[in-house]
Image: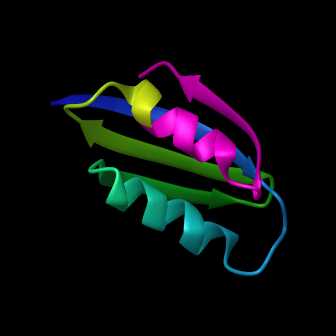
Amino acid sequence: MTESTLYITLRPAPAALERLLRLVRHRGFQLTQVQWHPQGVRLSVKHEHPLSHLTRQLEKLADVVSLTEEAV
């Protein structure tokens, strides 16, 4: 399994974090760490599928303002 870290800026909307985490789980990615910051969320995930499968879906969420992959 590969581990990757994403930094995601979210709109301040009710349940935005819940929608984000649900999508990660439904796509079969295993959360290893979640850090909440006022500016956004840092997620560490383990995965067997290409990370692009997750990032493409995350970018479609209306709550996501920006998404960057961080070097591990």
Viewer-closest of 22 and 38? 22
Q: Position of residue 48 (x, y in %)?
A: 19, 32
Q: Position of residue 26 (x, y in %)?
A: 34, 60
In the drawing, does residue 40 fall left or right of residue 20? right
Outermost residue to the bottom: 14
- Write down the quadrant of residue 44 in the picture: top left
Q: How is the image coloured?
A: rainbow
- Which range of residues does the magenta coloring cover? 54-72
Viewer-closest of 20 and 61? 61
Q: Residue at x 54, y 56 (%)?
A: 35
Residue 41 in sight: yes
Relative to 26, say whether 59 is above or below: above
In the drawing, does residue 64 fall left or right of residue 51? right
Viewer-closest of 69 and 37? 69
Residue 6 in sight: no
Q: Position of residue 51 (x, y in %)?
A: 39, 28
Q: Position of residue 39 (x, y in %)?
A: 80, 52
Q: Residue at x 64, y 28 (%)?
A: 68
Q: Is residue 70 magenta?
A: yes
Quadrant of the image containing the C terminus? top left
Q: Residue at x 32, y 24 (%)?
A: 50
